[in-house]
Image (cartoon, coloured by chain):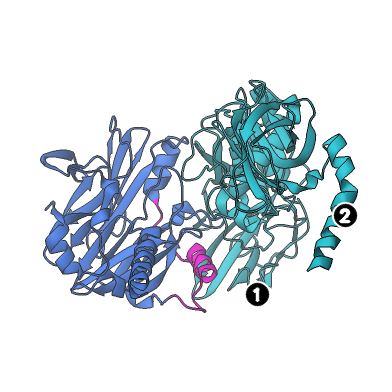
Chain colours: A cyan, B blue
Amino acid sequence: MLKMMLRCLLPALLLLPFASFSQDFSYSNVHIVSVTFSGGNLNIRKDEGTGSYSSPQWLATSTTKNPVAYVSGNAPKAAAVFTIDCATVPDSVWVRGNASDAISFPAKHVSVANSATTVHDFNYPSTTGSHVFTAGIVRFFKPFAIDWEISFDNGSTWKPIGTTNNTIYVTRSAPQSKTSEFKWFRTVYDLSCRNAQTKTTDADIISSVWSEFTDHVVLNWNGDSLFYYKIMNSPNVTLATLLKYKDAECYTFAQLFLSSIKIQGVVRTNNYVYITPQNNSVCGHTVNRFIVKDWAFGTPSASATCPGFPYMNTYTTLIPAPYHAYAFTTADVTDQAGIPGSCNINPSSYFNNHQIALLDGIYYDACYGVTFNTLSDIKTAAFSGWSYRYTTGSTTYAYFTNDLNLSDLTETISTY
Amino acid sequence: MRTAFYILFFLVTVFTLRSQEIERKIVIEKGRFYYTTIDPEQQMGTLYTGNISASLKTAKRLALPAGRNYNDPVNPFCWDVLNETVYAVNSLKHPMNDQNESLKRFPLASLQDWSDKVTITEMLNKSIDYNTFTPNIPYAFVTKKSKVLDHFFYDAIALDDTTFCMGLTNNNEFSFWTFNGTGWNHLEMTNFPVSGYFSLFNVKQDVYMILDNGKIYSVSAKKVIPLTEKILNTELSKGFLIINKDDGSVKFLKNDQLNDHTALNELIKKKAIAIF
């Protein structure tokens, strides 16, 4: 027992002079436990579909830190919890934080809680930052860092405790209201604020957000690719399922683009366009399919059946497992690599309909990252041909033409 | 421990039913009930059926090769059951699903239980190439009249084996369509604003429409007449209709009155509000 006491006493005696003169005992025994942001921060839904991010947004015990979002013109508000592991502690200490964007969380005199052990808690109260995020400007802090400091001598000297990092999204204006389709997902904030950072006008925000789509690499908040038809029969048609499964149909990319505009408070009605062949009749059927570049047209086998649509393919299951190619039983027309989509060099390309966005008179096709000035521009720029089909028994007969004059697109417009 | 188990069981049961809500109505025909739900992620429909003297939780689940989209505002799944046949407007969003071919008719006996072999993917593929029983002329008419969709709602019912009715609203206009097996007749009304979805139902061969605000109209290919004495004192979206084709009654049950452990006929007797 005596030996043990001596072993503890010796290092303590050696360290005593330093602590006495510099008050610089080991600050590593002061720990940040959590940081909670408040003050009108916006709800952020998890892409995984498991609800919204909660507070505290920063927890020492969690490897991932939750994001935070504010509308510009508001100041962040933060509270923090700390512990100090020390046999003898003062009744109170001073704490402050210096954060990104030159925002400071002012020094506060806080009590150190009594404890039966050597570990004592103290809390930095919920405090508004020194200034607001400049009104009317999109900001993106990845990370928004707060350097926390402590003082034992009424603020004469400050020592660093540690840094907390959270992603903070600042939207230009209040986001548009959530609907059953438009929800405030993390990737919506991230994609929007990442691209439109420092932008102020509707036009600049729209063009900046659009830039995410033009290189065919659309990424979620975590840097993961969002695929346009990773599997050719992806059933995912909603923003929620695109973000959850990272693979979806055309509907969802239009929705992601429009959501990333709406999250900044940009208002545009009649912005969601559904395009489909105009259903004109040929050979006793209606034209209700189109094929997106490129398709190779071989020798027509159905000229006698329908001279205008002389190419015929047949199938029983169009896209069988593992869902990476069309499986025609017979084929005059075959799919080729053509126009790439998001994260996919040869996505599905045989459709009845397609969904795009319409903003200020421009058609934005978010899956392919291209724009069109008129509806008629789409078929000439993107289509290889038209098709109709019917099913008899278990076989579907599809007829094709590469004469783009034999049909046209029609549109219906709604507000997303 | 036992109490905790019962609480958990109750919550799971309630959550399961609530997470996939009944679409529009329960139909009762030949002593059996039918209702539908829509998969919350993949749009596909499920038809539930069971004996009217049994509870809803005992229903058999049949995969429908049809479903509905999640557009906002929501237009619930349009479906009906008549004489062993299921009718549906297959409005699901899919790049191969043609809205002009969305009117479908399936023999009840052809529907299969959901299983490892009857999957969402398979039913989705089946739905897009399943032949329509007649082109959706009402949809084509409305979208040709105005390419802008605003307050676009619709419903459809089968009156008999050859008569199929459809009602649509868009841009404050209403049209009612009757298909007699060979062609369509229709009625158009301007200045007919609606704020949410409506449902059609029939009492024998008479067709009625109930709006989201509870107002009820008599509808035919010739005229639309408001029934001032028939106003449901609740919003349509707060519950669902119960169309009993056996006794000709039409009732309404609020969602919060739904109890899937009680025999349906008992539940109707105790909780449902009579409309007809």
Tell me where residue A105 appears, x and y as whole percent.
68, 28
Can you identify the residue that label 1 sits on? A329
Is residue B129 located in the magenta-colored stretch of the structure? yes
> Going by the image, does A27 lie left or right of A90?
right
Q: How many marks?
A: 2
Q: Chain of mark 2?
A: A
Q: Place residue A75 in its image quadrant.
A: top right
Instruction: Tell me which segment is drawn in magenta.
Output: B114-136
- Say which residue appears at 79% left-offset and 47% top-offset: A28
- Residue A5 versus residue A173 in the image, above or below: below
Mark 2 near mark 1, Cβ–Cβ under 8 Å?
no
- Of residue A154 and residue A219, the one placed in the foreground of this image is A154
Sequence-first tag of 2 and 1: 2
Residue A217 visible (yes or no) = no
- Say which residue appears at 69% left-offset and 48% top-offset: A220
- Say which residue appears at 15% left-offset and 39% top-offset: B225
Tell me where residue A318 appears, x and y as whole percent.
61, 68
| Label 2 crowd bin: few (<14), some (14–19), many (20+), radius 10 Å | few
Residue A388 visible (yes or no) = yes
Q: Place residue B168 in its image quadrant.
A: top left
Mark 2 or 1: in front is 2
- Of residue A275 and residue A204, the one placed in the foreground of this image is A204
| Furthest-front residue in this view | A2
Tell me where residue A164 appears, x and y as whole percent.
72, 41
- Of residue A129 and residue A75, the one placed in the foreground of this image is A129
Type of the residue with mark 2: Pro
| Label 1 crowd bin: few (<14), some (14–19), many (20+), radius 10 Å | some
Which SS class for mark 1? loop
Type of the residue with mark 1: Thr
> Going by the image, does A116 lie left or right of B211?
right
Are the residues under badges 2 and 1 in a single subunit?
A: yes
Can you identify the residue that label 2 sits on? A11
